[in-house]
Each structure stands twice: as C-alpha cells, then as structure tokens.
Image (spheres, grey):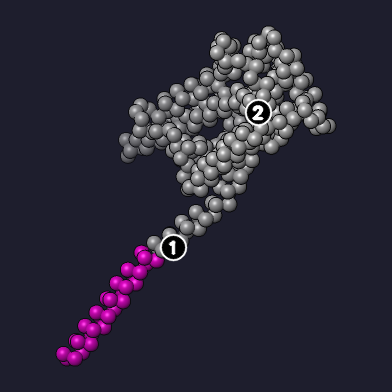
Amino acid sequence: MPDESRQKLGKNEAYRHNLVDQVGTRPRHRIATDQVGRERAVFSQIPGALSRAILIAMMVATPSLLVPSTGPDTAQIVIVLSILAGFMTFIEYYGRYPSIIEFRFAPPFNRLKFFALSGILIVLSLICRGTTDPTGWTVLLTNMGSALGEVVDFPYSPVRMVVLMMPADADQSLVDLVRTTSGISYTVSLVMMFVFLTLVRLLGWPSRNGAFNVWVNLPLFDPTGGGDVLYRLRRDAGLNVVLGSLLPFLIPAAVRAASDMIDPISIANPQTLIWTMTAWAFLPASMLMRGIAMSRIADMIEQKRRRAYAEDDILGKGLQRA
C-alpha cells in the first residue's frame, strides 16, 4: 500500500508539473508570436514610408529641377529641404500611429492634396521654364494658363487682388506671368476642394472606408482639452473654413499695404514666384478641406450619439413595461 500511494503521488506530481509547464509556455508563446507580428508589421511599413518620402523629396525639388535659371546656392538649399522633408515623411509613416499628419488612415484626403500640390508645382515650373527655354509643352501650358487667368481675373476675385498687388511700374510680362500662375494655382486648389467636397457629400467619406478612429486620424486634437468634443470640432471647423475663405483676399491686400517694406517685384525670381503662388492658393484650400472634414466628423459623432440615446430610450421603455 505505501508503495502504491507513493506511485500515485509521483504520477500526480508529474502530471501537475507537466500541466504547469504547458500553461506557463502558452503565454510565453503568445508573447513571442505578438512580438514577431509587430516586427513584421513594422518592416512591412518600410516600403510605403520610403516611397512616400521619395515622392515628397522629389516634389520639393521639382521647381529647381525644371527651372534652368536656378542658382547654385538655391540648389543647395533645395537639396537640404528635400532631404529634410523626405526624412520627416519617412519617420511619420514608419510609425504605426501618426504624430503630425492628420487623416492618415482616411484616404484619399492626403493623396488628393499631394496630387494637387504636385500638379501646381509642375505646371508652374514648366511655364516659368518656357520664359527662357520654350518648347511645345511649355507654350501649350502657357497659352492654357493665360486663358484660364483671364477667365478668373474678374473684379474682386482673388486673382485680381494678386494682380493689383503688383506696383504700377511693373513690367507687363511679369504682370501677365503673375496672372497666369495665380489663375492656375487657384483653379487647381478649387478643383481639389470641390473633389473632396464631392467625396464627403456624395460618397460618404470617411465612413465608406470602414470604421473611423477620430483620435488616430486627428493626432493634434486633444480630446481632454476641456468642453464638449462636438462643440470643439465644429468650432475648429468653422475657424478653418473662415480663414480658408478669407486668406486668398487678405494676403494680397496685406502685401499691398506693406509695399513700402516688402517689394512685390521680388517675385520676378522664378523660384519665389512658383512657391509664393502655390502657397497663396494651396494653403487656404487645405484649410477649407480640413474644416469640411472636421465638420463631417462632428456630424458623424452627433449621429452616433443620437442612435445611442434612442437605443437607451427604447431599452428604458422596455424595462418599464417589464
């Protein structure tokens, strides 16, 4: 009997140790699997981050590459800025979660902005290149841009404000070039904004892409800043819409008022002209897009709250009847 009990105790002890080992290895196995999965996810993001970094660097360098009159000092500065922009883009998209770029997981918000900005820079660079080295493409783009500039250069328009910003003794060819470049940049920016508005109103952006995470897509928005989130989103949306609508008018007026300190004729430099006209049109349009997007997110949050309140009311009535 003592031998049999010892054997049973030995078997039970061995079984217990075996069970503990199996249970103990399962969490370690899951931890190792999760670590491998995270490493694979990080490495899988490298090609996308690298391709985006290259595209951003090329976009920043586009005017210097296409305009032949770029000086060596300007070229060196552009190279540094291109590398810096590409590096920041790579770091941003290499991480699993964004730190600066908004709506990273809500395409095609950023893609639309990238294509519009690239198109403006390429077209304006080719037009400026055509002033010294004309080709068939540059002549065609210049003629199309001149016609477009004449169409949008009506009284009290932003393009007319830019043209009036020029001094009275400015060369007529420079005035025509400013009208052409401002007309193209402003028109492309408006098209970008209306395309995004169509995606929001008719195609249901961003909910058509699946679940939308507000806090991941708005990394600069602090939900703990105080007050109702819905009110703050709509306040920021209204501020962006107002500024985006007024800046194309206010910037030329401010430059004209400060003409004693700032000489508008300095935009005769092709690089300065390209980037000035691009920023003047693209940045306000981007603010309008951001305002539209935040207003849409506020509407989505409000609709979700109403559904939750309705479900609570139905549940409460059911409990009262029971």
311 left or right of 280 in image: left
- Looking at the image, is 11 positioned above or below residue 247? below
The residue type indicated by label 2 comes to Gln
Instruction: Confirm whether the magenta stretch covers residue 11.
Output: yes
**Which of 316 and 241 lies nearest the eye of the viewer?**
241
Q: Could you say where residue 182 lies in the image, as x and y percent from the top left?
A: 67, 21
Label 2 sits on a secondary structure element that is helix
Q: Quadrant of residue 203?
A: top right
CA gap between label 2 and label 1 equals 52 Å
Q: Quadrant of residue 286?
A: top right
**Which of 272 and 315 lies nearest the eye of the viewer?**
272
Disc 2 target residue = 271
What residue range appears in magenta? 1-29
Q: Image point 31% across, 76% down: which residue?
A: 18
Disc 1 target residue = 33
Q: Residues within 10 Å of mark 1 (few under 14, many from 20)?
A: few
